Amino acid sequence: MTITATGIRTLADLNPAGRGANGQEALGKDQFLRLMIAQLKHQDPLDPAKNEQFLAQLAQFSSLEGITNLNESVSAMAASMRSTVTSEASSLVGRSVLVPTNQTLMQGRGLIGNVNVSEPTDDLVVEISDRSGANVRRLSLGPQEAGTTRFIWDGANSSGEPQPPGVYRVKAYANGSGSAQQFPVDLPEYVVSVSLGKDGMLLNLAGGSTVPVANVKEIQ
């Protein structure tokens, strides 16, 4: 009598790469174990699975279980981190933060910001303009080395007249040697709300700009 095993396939035949060409989900550890037991029940008694094959399948099951448990742990950790970041971001609403932006809401008391100087300059200039683009004040900070340079605007124009509250734009550049290279600035801004975007938690600022919460330099 000849016993054949036509139609019986190994686990590797059923799902060699964990995800078939048709895009179906990979086998879970429970399905994997049931398939392995079914294979043992229906194997050819005259040609049983070799020990090496069985051990290899056990190793595959162990790896699959480990990956499944790891994915569950990472998912739980990610959910916990999202909850923490959301809670921390919401606590910033109504607070003043120092963030990379070129415009900010000045409430009549002036402002203090940073210029991120990428290379030494003979004369670092900070210009403040109103929403229409009209120049309000020009601050000459003199020679500066590469690094972060603090500047203060007292809220007055070039004639010493206090400016009304509103949105103002700030530009910093190197003046001299025929160069007008611009440098990024960090300005104080009020957080009015928090939203969730594709890049994570975002702070919506009073001046109209939006920045990721990770970009906050200072909380004032």
Image: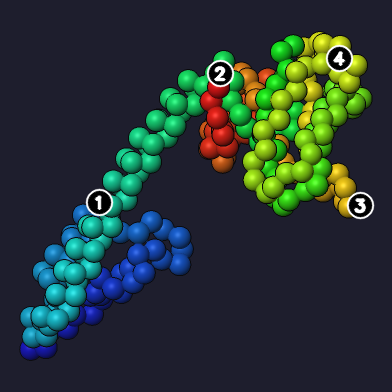
Q: Which mark is residue 95?
A: 2
Which of the marked residues, 3 or 2, is nearer the chain's N terminus?
2
Going 40% across and 30% down the picture, which residue do you hit? 83
Q: Please say if 8 is above or below 36.
A: below
Going 19% across and 63% down the picture, which residue do you hit? 62
| Residue 92 pos. (x, y %) | 52, 22
Going 21% across and 54% down the picture, which residue do you hit? 30
| Residue 164 pos. (x, y %) | 81, 10
Q: Secondary structure at mark 4?
A: loop
What residue did someone put label 4 on? 160
**The N terminus, quarter of image:** bottom left
| Residue 200 in view | yes
What residue did someone put label 1 on? 69
Q: Amino acid at mark 1?
A: Asn
**Separation of disc 1 and disc 4 at Cα?**
66 Å
Kindly report which numbered mark, 1 or 2, lies closer to the viewer in this rendering. 2
Q: Which mark is residue 178?
A: 3
Q: Amino acid at mark 3?
A: Gly
**Separation of disc 3 and disc 2 at Cα?**
41 Å
